[in-house]
Image: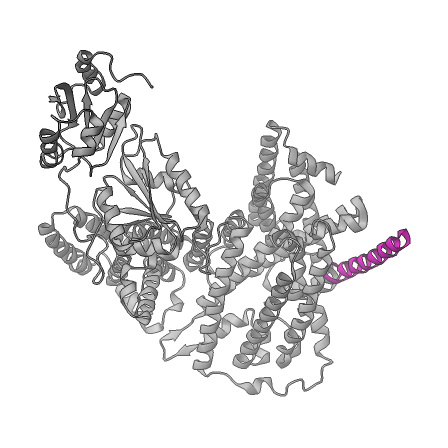
Amino acid sequence: MNLATDVGRDAWIVPLICTFIGMFLFWWFLYIIRHSEQKTIYSLFKQSLGQAGGSILGVIYITYFIYICARDMRDFSELITNAVLPSVPLEWITLCFMATVMYVLWIGEQNFINLFVIFGYTVAAIFIVFVVLVIADGQFDFHNLLPIMGDGIGPLLPSTFTQVMEFPFGELIAFTAFAGTMFPNLPGKVVRAGVFSVLISGLLITLTILIELITFGPSIRERALFPLVSAARNISIGNFIERIEMLVIFAIMLAAIVKVCIFAYAALQGVVWYTGKAYKSLIIPYLLLTTVISYYVSNNMSEHIIVGLGFIPVFIHIPLQFVIPALLLILILIKSRWRKQNDRSIV
Amino acid sequence: MKRTYFFILMFLLVTALDILCLFQNEQWNFLVMYSQSKKLVVAILLMITAIIYCAVMDWKERKKPGDGREALRDQKNG
Amino acid sequence: MTGLLYKTWEELESTFEHSFGKTTDFVKVPVMFNERKCWILYYSSLVGSANLSSKLMLPFSQHAGKAESLEQFRAAALASINYMYLTDWIQIARQLNKNSVCILVEGEYEALSIEIGGYTERSISEPEIQQSIYGPKIAFTESIETNISIMRRVLRTKSLQIESYDLSSDKVTGAVLVYLDDVIAPELLQEARQRIQRMEGKKVATLNHLLEGLRDDKKANFFPTLMINERQDSCVAQLLEGRAVVFMEGSPQGIILPAVFQDFFKSPEDAYVPAAMMLFMRLLRYCAFFITLLLPGIYIGVINFNYEIIPINLAIVIAGLRSNLPFPSVIELLLVEAAFEIMREGSVRMPKVVGNALTVVGALVIGEAVVQAGVVSIVVVIIVALTGLSSYAFTYYNFAFSIRLLRFVFIGIASILGIFGVFLGCVILFAYLVNQRSFGYPYFQMNSKRSLL
């Protein structure tokens, strides 16, 4: 939630850089799965590593998706216990949230995609209202941003490559589990739309961090757990429009549902691939598992953030998001060249 | 019973990953967290529900064998 | 059954009794047709005496003496009337039940059935449920013929197609499917035909039975997926958009299919006001939708869990008003809601003259006495009144009804989980709406394109 705090006032540049890397990443992921038979990453593993190796790697990826899903669930539940319902235990909030996610997944992919389109419009509307209110409120200071990149680009790099590139952008790997089955053969139109939406969402993240920075300044932002919510809480126009954080939390909730659903769906597609059971019969057990794991990912919020932004990106995200896809890409290229040569030699 | 076994496998793997992450972060007290009574009761209840659900679904499927599609999938995956 | 209608002329009388029973409105008149014996059969309850004498009896007395055969008589005297030759008793019974008169002549083994009709019908009146300031003051009536005529008077084109279906177990309750064959999607037409045919032979007494048969989901659904409409202009508009309308004998409304979520926010009036005004009104209706659905829930959530999000001055006022009330806020709200719902239900059933009195008494009791006695806070009364008013802003009664029900669900969730519960409820509600289908069309979709899934 609180991205790139260690670079202070230049935090907004990091996601901007990562957006362009992210666009390339997404194109790369889709390129990889276009080269598999069944157009999913699981079939690609089998194709390139054989039955046993492919299965092991696939199961590792399912584990990874479930774990990330659990972390996101925990993120959101922490936000609710901190900002909305301090009196209700975290376990209950996660359970209720999970029940909603279950229903959303149960209505089937064609329907929840339509639902997410509606969510997108809602979030966009809330974001516009929020930006307008921030501007109308007038309690912001562009001097918080100055000097832009005063220390050069050097200090930005660690946080770029070990945090932001993995945390929202590298997670696009989840799409490789189902994009190919949802849009058969992945025509260029779909890829272009995907890359474009990565651009839009990256710019949104940049804009969000900008708003957080100009309202608070880097030092308060660093200490706040949910800076966006705090920024919304600070808005006060004529003592009448006050504390619009509920709107922002609603938007964050919609985004959280989308994210959790996508990871859960990616994991479920993997389970379907390996067990061959009906998708709807798997929703309940795997989401219950996700809930249990989300209880245990950490003791408290600060520990959760330390693990989520420190250890996980480096030791879990990087191998699974970049190293393995890169190896797969190399494998695909070698194989296709080899096949071409073979074809030529046969002719 | 494929569904149940796969689910238990996934449960073990995800728990292992979770413990690994906590352990790596020098959270030596993860055992304390794992034994917090309220959380533990809820978690155990949820896991039992999930496993029973899996087992029931498997048992239901066993009653009507001959689902051609599933057999095909099994064959494909060995 | 291709046997003869009768073997000997004399056995006919017992056949009548055998096939039609002893019902008293069944009339059989023995007359002479060019010196042959002849029976005229009809139900006196379905054939008007004025129509009978002018359409049949007068020509009969003039021409029957001269005609050689039944067909010759029909061609000469009854040229302008719908007719049919029938050869078995089941068909005769069916035709008699469809306002016809049957003529049997000795020596001819086919019965002539001619449509006479003319029983008393309600005349066309103004729409009562869906009132509108502008637009034609024509509502559908209970008769299918009248309804079709109402439609064709506006859509004078050959592409207006009407298909008749005989529903119900006795295959007499009629239904018609009306559509414009150059606009409607062929898949929709196919689906509609199939679903109406599926209803044949089942018990269809009211429009509701038909609705249940036509619906996609057989289980209970909260939101109407088919629209009931009694106005000529909105039905015509829907037909032009490529939808179909089903009329049923005996019910003064048409069923428009398919109907999606957004359709329930359109009013027939929209066509008569400027575009900006129409947009405003529609926006207002969407607001009313959310107020009706969410306001009580949000109130409960804010009062019980998130006092801090209301502006401080308002919070102080509300707290002051609620300071020494006997009930928890949920009970308080439910009490007033219940009183309001009872009042609404009561005023629907009341005769018009007493209805006003009831409203006044209700307003006095609820609005004044309860607050002054200190049983409920005045804020709750305001909330309930606003919610109630908003629920009247819909043009379709059954749509408002479903929201009224769901409101209580939201109050329930909010009392447990506060505003967070309301949020989750919204998500589930929208997921439910997205999952619904109306004749295969997605019920709730952001872009107005309606791809058949």
Q: Quadrant of residue A214?
A: bottom right
Colouring method of the image: one colour
Left or right? Give the position of A6 relative to A260. Answer: right
Work out which residue is located at the far right of the displayed protein and give it: A345
Residue B30: quarter of image: bottom right
Residue C132 shown left or right of residue A215 in the figure: left
Where is residue C384 drawn, in percent x and y? Answer: 26, 58
Q: Report which quarter residue C35 is drawn in.
A: top left
Q: Main secondary structure of the magenta part?
A: helix
Choose between C5 and B21: the one closer to the eye. C5
**Looking at the image, how many numbered discs can be counted on the residues?**
0
Looking at the picture, how far across and down is residue A200, in whole percent?
58, 70
**A203 on left or right of C42:** right
Q: Where in the figure is residue C223, as x and y percent of width and height?
A: 37, 49
Q: With respect to residue C414, does C35 lie above or below?
A: above
Residue A335 forms part of the magenta stretch:
yes
**Percent of width and height locating residue A283:** 57, 45
Viewer-nearest residue: C341 or B30:
C341
In the displayed structure, does residue B67 sit left or right of residue A37?
left
The answer to whether A102 is drawn above or below residue C31 in the figure is below
Q: Is residue C328 visible?
A: no
Residue at 61% across, 34% down = B58
The magenta segment: A319-347
